[in-house]
Each structure stands twice: as structure tokens, then as C-alpha cells.
């Protein structure tokens, strides 16, 4: 019986634990898979006059091979959506007037599976509301499509803490804006451009971030742009994405912040405790059955030795 207890204890040790150690010295790429999703709290200001608040959602749809700017590559397709409110001062032909409304975002982003650089973005934002003083409804549609070619990439996973590098993108952008107040003629603007952008990236340190989804150990990644703007990403390996993102303008003022509300990241999920109990129980039962069979077999052999005549129990050996 003591052997049964020892083997049962050994079987339970086969169940993996869920304790996490400190973050390592290098940051690995997240192990995304279809169904991973993240929900963020979002707030932003545009030129200090229009304020947006709401939620953003991103979900990994899967991996496919696509052609971007003449280059075939494997990408993660990430579906993007969001909704919220806006409030601020809008420029009109009659001057600046206060306005309130709601916005809705739909889109898609393609991330190269190896480098995790964004190679294509499609974003549509629709906003409707009311211009206060004029008592006029407004309708805003903003569409942006950007495709990137990675010209230079000094930022490749795994990345050691303290590493700095430059990433140069050749970006092809098409943007369209539609704005209408009441029944007045709409204002349409379109912009098409191809430009090369160099971004400086640094894995500055390890830290912690407390957000609505909880407290996470994070890597702090900083990006600096040619116009003086910058971004800080608090990347949480346990969530497979950023716990917090902050964007700053050229004066250092924060203009955008996202904070993780909830998420589903399969690679970071702890084993199901109930499933582990079932596995442990199955292993324990299997061990018990095996020991029982062994015990019965030994008793049978011992009984056979006691009651079987020696002539049948021990056949004679052949001799010369």
C-alpha cells in the first residue's frame, strides 16, 4: 500500500504548475494564434481641440500569404474595431464651434509573421453628431489605407534589454476625408503620398503596468519619429500584446493612451485547473489499476507455487 501512495504522489507531480518567473533579459515575439483578442480603453486628443474616448478591439483572424507592394509574405490578419464618443471644437465656414457626437472604427491590419512589422493597414472611421451653436448635424467619414515596405530593420526578435535600432519604412498612403454639416455641400479631401519614414526603437527596460485588466510585468519599448513625436509601449508577454500604449507629440505632451481592459491569449493561458485535476485522477487510477493487477499476479504466482506439485512447477533442466 505504501508503494501505491508513493506512486500517486509521483503522478500528481506530473501536473504542471502555473507560477511565473521574472521576465528574461530578452523579449521574444508573441505567439499569436487565431482567436487571440484584446480590448482596450482608448482616449485621444486631436490638436488639443477634439477629444475622443471609447474602446478599441483587436482580434487575430489567422495567418495567410498575401502580396503587399509586390512582395509575397506570410502575415497575421488582425481585425480591428472600436466605438466611442467625441467632443470638441470644430472648424466651420462660420468659425470654430463646439460639437458632440459618436464615432465607430472598422479596419484590418496585416503584421509580417517574422518581424511583426505592420505591412498594411485599412482603417475607416465614421462619426456623427450635432454642432451645438448652429444646431446642425454633422457627418464625418475618414478612410486610410497604408502599405509598407520594410527597407531597413535593425529590430528583430528576440531583443535584448538595452537594445536600440532603426527601422526604415517606405510607406504608400491613400487618405480620404468627407465632412458635411446639415444639408450644406460636403467637403471632400483626398491625399495620396509615398514617403520613407525612419523610426528609432529602443527596448529601454523592464517594468510593471497596472491597467484595468490587472497588473503585468512589462518590457518598455520606446519609438521616436522624425517629427519629434514618440510612443511608449508597455508590452506584457503574459497578454501577448501591449498592456498600455502612450503617444506624445513633439512637445512631450501625451495625446493618446490605450489601456488593456480584457484579453484572450492562448499561448499565455494557464492550464485549466479542473482539467489538471482530471489528468491527475486518470493517472492515479491507471497507477492503482496497474499496482492491483501486479499484486493479484504476484499472489496468484505465490499460490500456484504453494499448490502446484514440484514436477509441474519446476520442469527439469536438460542435462548431458
Image (cartoon, grey):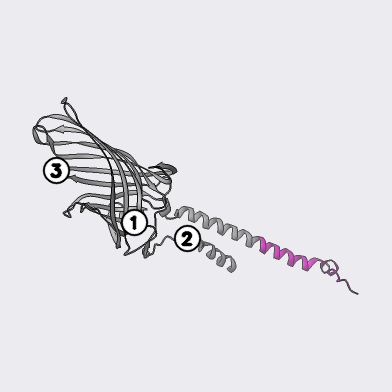
Lower sequence index among marks 2 and 3: 2
State the mark number for residue 146: none
Taking depth in this image into account, of 310 and 37 the one nearest to the observer is 37
Q: Mark 2 to mark 3: distance in Å?
A: 53 Å
**What residue did someone put label 2 on?**
16
Bin the neighbour count of mark 2 within 10 Å (Cα to Cα): few under 14, some 14-19, many 20 and up: few
**Magenta-span inclusion, residue 12:** no
Q: Residue at the bottom extreme?
A: 320
Q: SS for tag 2?
A: loop
Bin the neighbour count of mark 3 within 10 Å (Cα to Cα): few under 14, some 14-19, many 20 and up: few
State the mark number for residue 236: 1
- In the rendered image, which quarter is residue 252 located in? bottom left
Q: Mark 1 to mark 2: distance in Å?
A: 22 Å
- In the rendered image, which quarter is residue 59 located in? top left
Lower sequence index among marks 1 and 2: 2
The image position of residue 128, as x and y in percent, is 21, 33
Lower sequence index among marks 1 and 3: 3
**Cβ atoms at labels 1 and 3 below 8 Å apart:** no
Please identify the dominant SS of the magenta region.
Answer: helix
Q: Which residues are magenta?
A: 293-319
Taking depth in this image into account, of 87 and 305 the one nearest to the observer is 87
How many tags in the picture? 3
Bin the neighbour count of mark 1 within 10 Å (Cα to Cα): few under 14, some 14-19, many 20 and up: many
**Cβ atoms at labels 2 and 3 below 8 Å apart:** no
Q: SS for tag 3?
A: loop
**What residue did someone put label 3 on?**
49
The image position of residue 127, as x and y in percent, is 22, 35
- Name the residue rendered at 48%, 53% in the picture: 275
In the depicted structure, whether residue 218 falls above or below residue 72: below
Amino acid at each position: 500500500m505504501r508503494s501505491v501512495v508513493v506512486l500517486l504522489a509521483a503522478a500528481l507531480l506530473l501536473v504542471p504548475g502555473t507560477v511565473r518567473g521574472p521576465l528574461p533579459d530578452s523579449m521574444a515575439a508573441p505567439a499569436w494564434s487565431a482567436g487571440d483578442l484584446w480590448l482596450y480603453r482608448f482616449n485621444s486628443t486631436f490638436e488639443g481641440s477634439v477629444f475622443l474616448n471609447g474602446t478599441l478591439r483587436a482580434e487575430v483572424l489567422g495567418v495567410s500569404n498575401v502580396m503587399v507592394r509586390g512582395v509575397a509574405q506570410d502575415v497575421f490578419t488582425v481585425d480591428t474595431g472600436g466605438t466611442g464618443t467625441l467632443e470638441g471644437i470644430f472648424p466651420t465656414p462660420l468659425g470654430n464651434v463646439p460639437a458632440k457626437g459618436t464615432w465607430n472604427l472598422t479596419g484590418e491590419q496585416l503584421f509580417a509573421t517574422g518581424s511583426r512589422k505592420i505591412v498594411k493597414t485599412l482603417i475607416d472611421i465614421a462619426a456623427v453628431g450635432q454642432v451645438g451653436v448652429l444646431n446642425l448635424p454633422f457627418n464625418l467619414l475618414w478612410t486610410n489605407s497604408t502599405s509598407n515596405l520594410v527597407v531597413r530593420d535593425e529590430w528583430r526578435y528576440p531583443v535584448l534589454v538595452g537594445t536600440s535600432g532603426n527601422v526604415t519604412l517606405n510607406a504608400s498612403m491613400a487618405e480620404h476625408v468627407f465632412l458635411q454639416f446639415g444639408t450644406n455641400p460636403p467637403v471632400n479631401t483626398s491625399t495620396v503620398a509615398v514617403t520613407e519614414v525612419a523610426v528609432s526603437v529602443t527596448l529601454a527596460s523592464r517594468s510593471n503596468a497596472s491597467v484595468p485588466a490587472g497588473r503585468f510585468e512589462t518590457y518598455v519599448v520606446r519609438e521616436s519619429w522624425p517629427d519629434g513625436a514618440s510612443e511608449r509601449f508597455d508590452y506584457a508577454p503574459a497578454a501577448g500584446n501591449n498592456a498600455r500604449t502612450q503617444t506624445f507629440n513633439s512637445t512631450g505632451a501625451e495625446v493618446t493612451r490605450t489601456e488593456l481592459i480584457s484579453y484572450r491569449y492562448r499561448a499565455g493561458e494557464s492550464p485549466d485547473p479542473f482539467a489538471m485535476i482530471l489528468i491527475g485522477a486518470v493517472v492515479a487510477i491507471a497507477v492503482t489499476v496497474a499496482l492491483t493487477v501486479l499484486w493479484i499476479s504476484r499472489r496468484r504466482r505465490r499460490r500456484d507455487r504453494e499448490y502446484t506439485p514440484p514436477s509441474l512447477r519446476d520442469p527439469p533442466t536438460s542435462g548431458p
